[in-house]
C-alpha cells in the first residue's frame, strides 16, 4: 500500500499478500475486505483507500469482473509490462486499450 502526496511524494504505508487461486471468488472477497482497512495518522485522522489498481494480465476475466464490481469504489484496471501503471482507456468502440506512449 502506497500513499501519495503533493509533488508525487510517496510513502509505503502497508504491505500484504493474498495467496490463493485468483480463479476463486474467495480470494477476491479477501482482497476487497483488506481494501476496506482504515489507517490512522499521528494526528488521529482516519484515512481509507480512495483508488487502487488491479493488474489484468493474469486471470483477466476475474480481474475485470472485480474492477467492474468495484469501479465506483476506486478500482482501476491496469496492465503490467510495457504500459506499467497506466490505467486502461476505452476506445470509441468500447474496447479497453492501454494509452499510447
Image (spheres, rainbow, N blue to C red):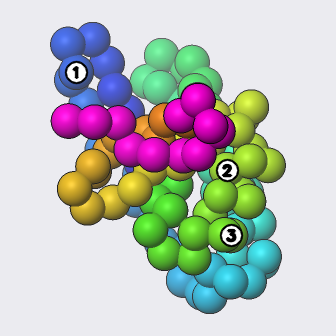
Q: Is residue 57 above or below residue 4?
A: below
Q: Residue at x 22, y 21 (%)?
A: 8
Q: Is residue 54 above or below residue 41?
A: below
> Which of the numbered marks, if any, corresponds to residue 30?
none
Observer-nearest of 58 and 25: 58
Q: Which residue is most to the top?
A: 6
Q: Which residues are magenta?
A: 91-101
Q: Position of residue 6 (x, y in %)?
A: 27, 11
Nearer-N-terminus badge (1/2) = 1
Q: Is residue 34 magenta?
A: no
Q: Residue at x 45, y 46 (%)?
A: 97
> Which of the numbered marks, if any, corresponds to residue 67?
2
Q: Which residue is mark 3?
A: 62
Q: Is residue 55 above or below residue 75?
A: below
As measured in the structure, the alpha-carbon distance from the residue carrying label 1 to the one carrying label 2 is 25 Å
Q: Position of residue 94 (x, y in %)?
A: 64, 39
Mark 2 residue element: helix
Q: Quadrant of residue 7?
A: top left
Nearer-N-terminus badge (3/2) = 3
Q: Are marks 1 and 2 in contact (CB under 8 Å)?
A: no
Q: Is residue 63 above or below residue 2?
A: below
Report the side of 98 relative to 23 (left or right).
Answer: left
Q: Which residue is mark 1?
A: 8
Q: Which residue is most to the front?
A: 93
As measured in the structure, the alpha-carbon distance from the residue carrying label 3 to the one carrying label 2 is 9 Å
Crowding at label 1, few (<14), some or many (≥20) Cα neighbours within 10 Å? few
Q: Residue at x 68, y 83 (%)?
A: 23
Characterize the magenta stretch by its predominant secondary structure.
loop
Amino acid at each position: 500500500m502506497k500513499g501519495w502526496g503533493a509533488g508525487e511524494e510517496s510513502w509505503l504505508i502497508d504491505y500484504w499478500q493474498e495467496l490463493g487461486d485468483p480463479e476463486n471468488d474467495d480470494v477476491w472477497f479477501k482482497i476487497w475486505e483488506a481494501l476496506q482497512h482504515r489507517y490512522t495518522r499521528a494526528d488521529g485522522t482516519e484515512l481509507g483507500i480512495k483508488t487502487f489498481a488491479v493488474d489484468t494480465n493474469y486471470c483477466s476475466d476475474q480481474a475485470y469482473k472485480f474492477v467492474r464490481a468495484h469501479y465506483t469504489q476506486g478500482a482501476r484496471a491496469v496492465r503490467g509490462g510495457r504500459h506499467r501503471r497506466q490505467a486502461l482507456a476505452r476506445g470509441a468502440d468500447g474496447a479497453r486499450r492501454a494509452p499510447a506512449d
